[in-house]
Image: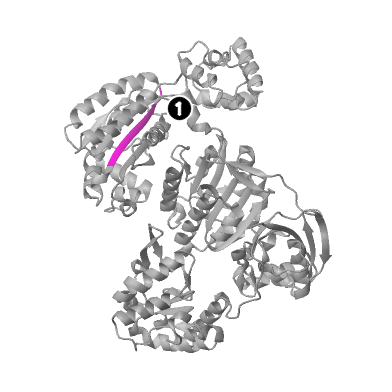
Amino acid sequence: MDHEPSQTKVFISYSREDKKYLEELLPALRSVRSVGDCLWYDTGEIDYGDKFHDKIQEALQATQIGILMLSHHFFASDYIRHHELPFLVRQAERKGVRLAILYVSAVAQGALEITVDVEGESRTVSLGAYQGFQRPRSPLQKLRIANRNAIYATLADWIRERLAPSVQPPPVRAHTGRRFELAIALEPSGRSWNHRFSLPHAHDFYTSQLDCPSPQTMLGAAALDVEGKDVFELLFGREPQMRGQLLGAAFDVREANPTRHPLRIRLLTDDRLCHLPWGQIKYEGRHLIEDGWTVEFHGTSANGFPEFDSHTCYFPGKVVLVGAGPGANVPHATTHVQDLHRFFQRSWPKAPEPVWCRTAMELRDALSTGSTRLVYYFGAASQEGLWLQGDGPDLTWTELTGLLTQSRSVSAVFLNLLGDDSFDATPQGRHLLEGAGAVLFQCSERRLAPRAARAGIDWLSSVFAASSPLDPVVALHRHQCGQVIAWTRYATWRTVAPRRVEIPDLVNLLLDRWTQRATILQAKEDFYTYTLRRIYQAVAMGTEGCRVSEFPAMASQHLRQNKREREVIIHQRVEMHDQLSDVEAVDDWIRDELRVASGQSIVNALLKPEDMSGHEFWFLVLGWVLPQPLHDVGTGERLLRSLAAWCRTTLAEDVANSPKQANIRIISILAIDTEAPELADDLEPCVLEAMDDLNDAETFHLGEPGLLAGVRLTDLQTYFRDNQICSCDDRYRDKFPRLLMGKRREMPFDEAVKTIRRGDPDNWGNLFETLSDMTVAGTWPPEAYDPDFWERYDVGA
């Protein structure tokens, strides 16, 4: 060791078998005085035992930067695996330590996966996600000494930039908590920049050309070649006195140090500057993000300070999760979206289920209905658009902008992008901002996918789930992975719980389905009575337009609202096709849908038993839905028998083999839309016959919740009479139910929802007159179910 453990800032973790490479590395680190003065490593002079352990633990506690010299010997060391490595990774996940990776020898990919406990949560982390100084396939053992020395020099410079200054800067006034604002307009002019600085109360209070990096340097440079200090100098110049006066104006004092207060920089400039590392802005080696600095783009603008209204995000509300499909080859895409589902289900059990989109068509459908509050994308992109399925854009930015603008309800779009091409997408934020309050980009290399996923969840937690929510841009900078860019059009942001959660209220009050929901709830309670039962399979049927496919999610929500203490309800939607004819076909299909490899436990992949505490009872609700209505009885019978047999055998065995099998129960719901009511009636005997054939095992039970009907007159009356839920003008409350129903016994749920949405919240009078005129003309109600009825009407009108 070079210094006492209490003075440690740089800790080198290595195997004594690799001492040759440590001895090569040390001269490079010692050549930089600020680095060499704070090194700690095991010299081999301490004997193993209590003294050895105490010394190393003391050094670890004082560590700011950890260097991991990875090799087979490194991972074979018991002490490293059980003491050094878990501590350093845990601290890195808490943002308390920065890790640098040197690959001494080739190592197995599996060795890089480390499981640690962070704040009581078990987390699996890939060491490959941390800063590596050469590729894993080019370990030090394979490189010439000249190449190794170049790597060591790069590492030394990297450490120097990230160490806290050994000489403390002059004391600054403690942050007051207030976030000051400063608008900076940057316009290239030959070999210089024209700077314009504005405050909320003083537009263009200073205009000049500052001594700073030239447009040729900043516009032509690759992002990796630009440092945080270059970004700071671009904004405030290199001259200390001028810099201090500009910041003093922002902080309402004569002259100020950048670390004095948090600062919100509103940037008005050329889109070509989006590629710069704004989230890494530095002053004298210090990351100003740590002092609450943020940078957000507004595009070019007229003179002055950008003026926007305050933005209110009503949340919880509808969330659209967009995950790249299997063809896009995006690491961790499916598992990350599943983790997001779990996050939303746990945080807001009574809120609408997040909508998961894997194709452009699904995303179009999701944004065209309901009031979407948040759109979250995890996958690849380029300057042309989102890459949902393959090696090219499936949805252009222009089309996405149109969808967001048409929705008129989206508060935030978080684009968690992976791949080198994604960095070129950030200028598109200017256009996307037409349909959202904030558009946030996080661009990372593909190898950083696990870390990017974690940063995404941390952002969601800070903005929507924290007791003291953060501004979305502040949270983006605080939890960033890779490069971050924010586009905004709000003065202030606040998150408010809506007076009502629209979708569940419509579902529960307009289409109550209390009998079917009660059947599923009783099935859950029966698990306590029939203690050997592990799986309950339900078959739910209804005609097209009655939203049968939504019943599994509705049932899951009902279970959460009526759960016992310590029960956890997890819902998983599975889309299937009508050609699944046997157990093997069902098993192959669900594994492909959920990205679960053959031989891997489906139950463990969805529930993650390592996250389960011993006192919790977990219910996994599998919602099986067909994308198209069923055409014939034979297909329906074959489908329900194949699925029931799979649950009864393969899934039952999977549950039995789970380490937490005593705490796991499965409720599987097959939702079948039929083209006509007669087809549902014809399927009824097939269900009863299957129940007789398959209900002979104590671990499995097949049941039927009953036919899922459409909306009845009493459902509409219940909805319209509740003025806490329905915003209808009181003049029309009693008249609307019969006007909507006409002379029918029931109406399709789809039709009811779409029609009511046309009146909510302030168009009720117009809707009433329209329906009255159509009734007189004989065009309302429609003669047959037409999912595009109102679209056709709008075109004709």
**Residue 445 versus residue 535 in the image, above or below:** below
**Relative to residue 177, is residue 134 drawn left or right?**
left
Residue at 49%, 65% in the rendered image: 95
Q: Is residue 355 magenta?
A: no
Looking at the rendered image, the quarter that the C terminus falls into is: top right
Which of the pair 338/645 is nearer the observer? 338
Which of the pair 196/107 is nearer the observer? 196
Which quadrant of the figure has residue 498? top right
Magenta segment boundaries in residue numbering: 665-675
Residue 116, position in %: x, y?
37, 63
Q: Is residue 669 magenta?
A: yes
**Residue 522 versus residue 290 in the image, above or below:** above
Helix, strand or loop status at disc 1: helix
Looking at the rendered image, the quarter that the N terminus falls into is: bottom left
Residue 585 visible in this rendered orientation of the protein: no
**Relative to residue 401, is residue 524 drawn left or right?**
left
Q: Main secondary structure of the magenta part?
A: strand
Residue 318, position in %: x, y?
52, 39
Residue at 45%, 80% in the rendered image: 6
The residue under label 1 is: 508
